[in-house]
Amino acid sequence: MLTLDRLSKIYANGTQALSDVTMGVAPGEIVALVGGSGCGKTTLLRLASGLEQASGGRVAVDGDIISAPHPDVGIVFQEPRLLPWLTVAQNIAFGVEHLPKAERDARVDEALLRVGLAGYGPRWPRELSGGQAQRVAIVRALVARPKVLLMDEPFSALDALTRASLQDHLLALWEAHRPTLLLVTHDVEEAAALADRAIVMQPRPGRVFKDIPIDLPRPRDRLSHDFAEAKRAILAALDGSLGNPHSSPRRISVPSGASW
């Protein structure tokens, strides 16, 4: 369980990025953080990863307080951030150097196979397309089998077709070991396609506005009525979080029997 308890963040210039954020993410659950600019989504992710320190409150994984980068918590950024002097296989294996070579190689080969890059291990990062590089970044984070994976808009720089393909690859990887996954996204369709819950944030300072269950079976039919209803629920909450008086917090029907 990933737990954020009364989390707040105030920067040195006095800007309050987060205020009293409390949420829990269950083992194996996928939660999407959605919200407008200034709602502190990326700050929250950095606090959860231990890359920044909170001004108040705490982050814990299975009761273990996170105050610095932790082996149980992986993170994927907007850019792949691959090391150019290492091959694809060496990049993926970078975080599991402590494992015996046979197990390390087996994990790398399995990960590349799952994302459609079998045989790409000897290649250099410069030889990859943007989508391929991001797939490598994702498997690099997952090959260590963290309990929690944090993702900061990992597909935002990609075209729509590549983005949808990588979302499917991500779910295939997640299915193997089912880490807890907390995903920051601006893409409402991405949230509806991937998440068990969408948490809509409210800006200035960032705080939780609405927690929306998305009770749809996987794989999800993006053309179905239920999928459209899930997107509509998230969009309505986003409008409310930004102060639209016609979309203030209210009950909105969510498909497949889920409730607010």
Image (cartoon, grey):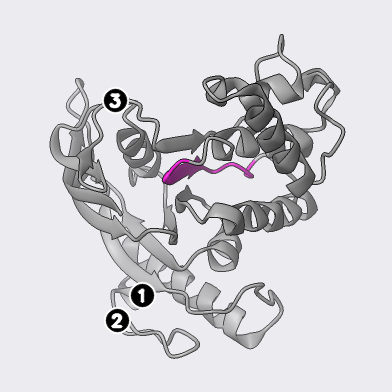
| Quadrant in which residue 140 is drawn | top right
Q: Amino acid at mark 3?
A: Ala
Q: Is residue 70 above or below residue 208?
A: above
Which residue matches tag 1?
Answer: 247
Q: Is residue 239 above or below residue 71?
A: below
Q: Residue at x 40, y 39 (%)?
A: 42
Q: Is residue 240 above or below residue 25?
A: below
Q: Kindly indicate whether the residue at mark 2 contacts the one at mark 1 (C-beta within 8 angstroms).
A: yes
Residue at the far top in the pictured view: 85
- Please state the horizontal and vertical placement of residue 75, each as a whole percent of the image: 48, 35
Q: Is residue 18 left or right of residue 149?
A: left
Q: Residue at x 66, y 37 (%)?
A: 107
Which residue matches tag 2?
Answer: 250
Q: Residue at x 35, y 26 (%)?
A: 69
Q: Amino acid at mark 2?
A: Arg
Assign a secondary structure to mark 3.
loop
- Please state the horizontal and vertical placement of residue 80, each as a whole percent of the image: 64, 29
Tag nearer the camera, 1 or 3: 3
Q: Earlier in the sequence, mark 1 or mark 3?
A: 3
